[in-house]
Image: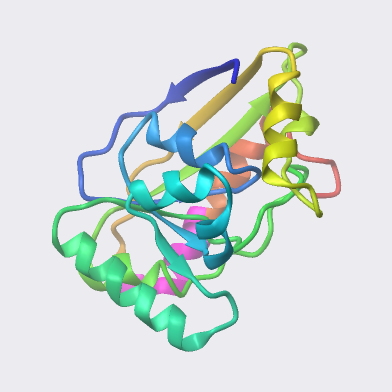
């Protein structure tokens, strides 16, 4: 895909929970290039061409968004995996953005790491164009189909991807709400560097 991936920070020791911002389906293979982890994805992805098969092969847990019963099942699956020394990764925004801002982080799934006392690694993913500015064309939003997005990405000039790995968060006693806020704060700080986010973000 012409991605030049640059990693800042240490590769964590498993098991960990990776918490990252979310712009594109590319976020998943990008994180996998750094650490193998089972992802949580919306249920619809299971039926997408190519990516659905890759998601299932990559130990993905599928969530029916807005379904509390499904969320409870996924939470228990995450705890089971973490207790088996298997890393997991989530996008706590719950959906993709166009990369210009950071949405609210939902804390429910992060609770799996708190309960199992697993280190939480905040990760900021930045797509940069040849001018070292935010590459706006990688966003996967709206009604665009997966295959259309793949072909569009293949036409882009080489894109740099920065993975900024924060320090492990292990302050479990402060509670899930606070530790989620700490993860979001680290990611937001990294995204604000070099005017990556929009001024109003």
Per the picture, the main secondary structure of the magenta-coloured stretch is helix
Give the residue displayed 47% in from the left and 64% down from the top.
180
Q: Which residues are magenta?
A: 172-183
Give the residue displayed 55% in from the left and 55% down from the top.
184
In the image, residue 116 above or below residue 154: below
Horizontal relation, residue 156 to residue 161: left or right: right
- The residue nearer to you, when weighing 80 against 100, is 80
Residue 172 in sight in this render: no
User: Residue 54: x and y, percent?
Assistant: 43, 44
In the image, residue 6 above or below residue 39: above
In the image, residue 194 above or below residue 189: above
User: Residue 129: x and y, percent?
Assistant: 73, 18
Horizontal relation, residue 134 to residue 44: left or right: right
Spot the residue most to the left: 84
- The residue nearer to you, when weighing 138 against 59, is 59
Give the residue displayed 30% in from the left and 31% down from the top.
11
Spot the residue most to the bottom: 69
Q: How is the image coloured?
A: rainbow
Horizontal relation, residue 5 to residue 119: left or right: right
Please state, as top left, top right, bottom left or bottom right, where the N terminus lies in the image: top right
Dividing the picture into quadrants, the one containing residue 143 is: bottom right
User: Residue 47: x and y, percent?
Assistant: 55, 58
Give the residue displayed 36% in from the left and 42% down from the top.
167
Dividing the picture into quadrants, the one containing residue 130 is: top right
Task: Let me know if residue 181 is in the magenta part.
Answer: yes
Task: Let me know if residue 23 is in the magenta part.
Answer: no
Q: How many marks?
A: 0
In the image, residue 113 above or below residue 200: below
Horizontal relation, residue 114 to residue 109: left or right: left
Residue 139 in sight in this render: yes
User: Residue 57: x and y, percent?
Assistant: 34, 47
């Amino acid at each position: 895909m012409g991605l030049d991936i640059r990693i800042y920070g240490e590769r964590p020791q498993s098991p960990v929970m990776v918490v990252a911002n979310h712009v594109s389906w590319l976020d998943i293979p990008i994180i996998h290039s750094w650490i193998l982890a089972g992802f949580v994805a919306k249920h619809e992805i299971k039926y997408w061409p190519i990516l659905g098969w890759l998601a299932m092969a990559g130990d993905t847990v599928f969530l029916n968004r807005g379904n509390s019963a499904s969320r409870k099942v996924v939470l228990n699956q995450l705890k089971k995996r973490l207790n088996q020394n298997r890393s997991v990764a989530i996008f706590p925004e719950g959906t993709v953005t166009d990369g210009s801002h950071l949405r609210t982080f939902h804390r429910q799934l992060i609770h799996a790491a708190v309960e199992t006392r697993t280190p939480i690694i905040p990760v900021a993913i930045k797509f940069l164009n040849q001018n070292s500015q935010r590459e706006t064309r990688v966003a996967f939003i709206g009604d665009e189909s997966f295959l259309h997005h793949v072909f569009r990405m293949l036409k882009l000039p080489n894109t740099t991807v920065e993975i900024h790995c924060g320090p492990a968060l292990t302050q479990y006693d402060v509670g899930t709400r606070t530790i989620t806020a700490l993860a979001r704060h680290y990611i937001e700080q990294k995204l604000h560097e070099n005017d990556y986010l929009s001024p109003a973000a």
